[in-house]
Image (cartoon, helix red, strand yellow):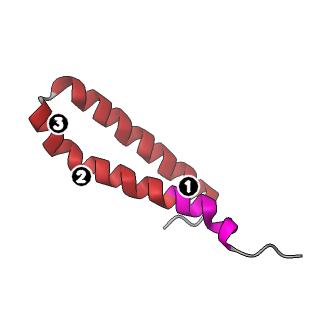
Amino acid sequence: MIQTDEEMLLAQQCVANLRRILLQARKVHSRQDYARMSAPILLEVQQREQEILEYLSRDLQRPIAS
């Protein structure tokens, strides 16, 4: 769970790195091999992106103080 802006930025960098890995893997692996090796990476990307969205929307869930 992301707690700070710095952790959120790090999570974004991790997602970008994983996407670069996937882009490179698509160039060198067959469709079947890519499908097998990319599944856990895609799941990791999805989970990290969800954590980022939750962190960014966290303040929206709190009532605004007057």
How many C-alpha atoms fall within 10 Å of the one at disc 2: few (<14), some, or many (≥20)?
few
Out of 40 and 65, give the one closest to the viewer: 65
Give the residues drawn in magenta, as a range: 52-61
Q: Nearer the N terminus, badge 1 or badge 2?
A: 1
> Is 35 located above or below residue 5 in the figure?
above
Q: Nearer the N terminus, badge 2 or badge 3?
A: 3
Looking at the image, do the residues carrying marks 3 and 1 touch, with CB atoms under 8 Å apart?
no
Disc 2, SS: helix
Count how many numbered circles sit on residues in the image. Answer: 3
Residue 12's spot in the image, x, y percent? 50, 47
Which residue corresponds to mark 2? 40
Residue type at mark 2 is Pro
Position of residue 19 in the picture relative to residue 62 (left or right): left
Q: In terms of secondary structure, what is the magenta stretch mainly?
A: helix
Residue 8 is marked as 1
Residue 7's spot in the image, x, y percent? 55, 57
- Camera-nearest label, 1 or 2: 2
Q: Quadrant of the C terminus?
A: bottom right
Residue 34 is marked as 3
Q: Residue at x 31, y 35 (%)?
A: 21
Cα–Cα span, label 2 and label 3: 11 Å
Q: Residue at x 23, y 31 (%)?
A: 25
